[in-house]
Amino acid sequence: MYSEKVMEHFRNPRNVGEIENADGIGEVGNAQCGDIMKIYLKIENDIIEDVKFKTYGCGSAIASSSMATELIKGKSIKEAVELTNKAVVEALDGLPPVKVHCSVLAEDAIKSALYDYAQKNDIEIEGLENFEPREHEH
């Protein structure tokens, strides 16, 4: 049912925690389904120097959060904006169809944190022009 990579990232999630004085913080989720994710970014010279997350949810949500943070750490803001939920699913060697929404949550949390960073620094980030933080849906 779950790939080895999903199980590995669930059992040993990477980048768990929070960053004090984070440059960008994104929180997305839906209390009704129980999946809530918070992402913290430390950005220097348009590079994501550090990223941490706190996720309340199922194993797929935790694995998606862990993998998503691994995929953007050390990358440029532009590369992070371009991360899709499909890329997260592929990096995890797949998710059951009913759990794909967890990868969407990860993508949205990253975009929400980048949006927060842009707002705090009064800048525009290409790819986030029409982004608005929203309620997570299945």
Image: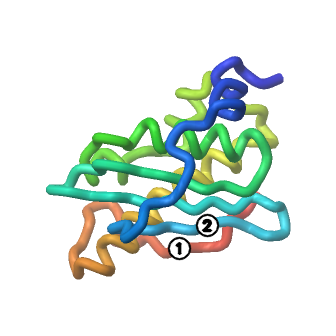
**Quadrant of residue 71 within the rendered picture:** top left
Q: Which residue is mark 2?
A: 28
- Badge 1 amino acid: Pro
Is 43 drawn above or below residue 87 in the view shown?
Answer: below
Residue found at x 46% / y 57%? 110
> Which residue is outermost to the front?
20
Q: Which residue is mark 1?
A: 133
Q: Nearer the viewer, residue 129 or 8?
A: 8
Q: Earlier in the sequence, mark 1 or mark 2?
A: 2
- How far is mark 1 from mark 2, CA to CA? 8 Å
- Badge 2 amino acid: Val
Is 11 drawn above or below residue 132 in the view shown?
Answer: above
Is 121 drawn above or below residue 1 in the view shown?
Answer: below
Q: Is residue 4 left or right of residue 52?
A: right
Q: Position of residue 116 (x, y in %)?
A: 39, 74
Residue found at x 54% / y 54%? 17
Q: Quadrant of the C terminus?
A: bottom right
**Could you classify mark 1 by the number of other residues whose Cα lies within 10 Å: few (under 14), some (14-19), or many (20 or more)?**
some
Q: Position of residue 5 (x, y in %)?
A: 64, 22
Check disc 1 and report its element: helix, strand or loop.
loop
- Whether residues under marks 1 and 2 lie with C-beta atoms below 8 angstroms apart, the answer is yes
